[in-house]
Image (tube, rainbow, N blue to C red):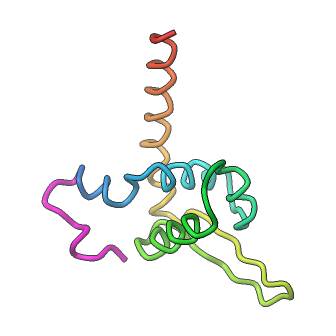
Amino acid sequence: MISNKKILDCPVATTINLIGNKWKLLIIRDLMSGTKRFGELRKSLTGISQRVLTENLRAMENDGLLTRTVFAEVPPRVEYSLNKTGLSLQPIIMSMADWGTRYKNNRL
């Protein structure tokens, strides 16, 4: 789960520590539509390296935001999905998307 160093007095700072980089937000966005394999996530996240995607997925799993399921097959298959805690971020992500759309429309 969340390490003590990530839990700060300010709840906003705690949230930023958990989802505060661009890749984590986009991973959450992609997983809101359902379970994805590593390759599917990598294709949808233009510009992310395999290493950075792996690091972010591991951190999100350790923080209790997603579930990683490994299937004993050849070749191995791994799937990622948001768990209950990860899915609870949906209203936040949707609010960010709405705000971003309004901002874009007002700037054009």
Q: Which residue is drawn at the image coordinates 44% and 34% (left, top)?
A: 95
Q: Position of residue 38 (x, y in %)?
A: 70, 67
Magenta residues, dominant SS class: loop
The magenta segment is 1-11
Name the side, left or right, on which 94 lies relative to 47. Answer: left
Based on the picture, tell me whether residue 78 belongs to the magenta stretch: no
Q: How many marks?
A: 0
Q: Is residue 28 above or below residue 83?
A: above
Q: Position of residue 87 (x, y in %)?
A: 51, 56
Name the side, left or right, on which 17 lies relative to 19. Answer: left
Name the side, left or right, on which 87 lies relative to 40. Answer: left
Q: Quadrant of the N terminus?
A: bottom left
Q: Position of residue 52 (x, y in %)?
A: 54, 65
Residue 91 or residue 99, whichever sits in front: 99
Q: Which residue is drawn at the image coordinates 17% and 63% (left, top)?
A: 8
Q: Is residue 78 above or below residue 36?
A: below
Residue farthest to the left?
9
Q: Which residue is drawn at the image coordinates 13% and 60% (left, top)?
A: 9
Q: Which residue is drawn at the image coordinates 62% and 50% (left, top)?
A: 47
Q: Is residue 48 above or below residue 7?
A: above
Specify the quadrant of the image occupied by residue 85.
Answer: bottom left
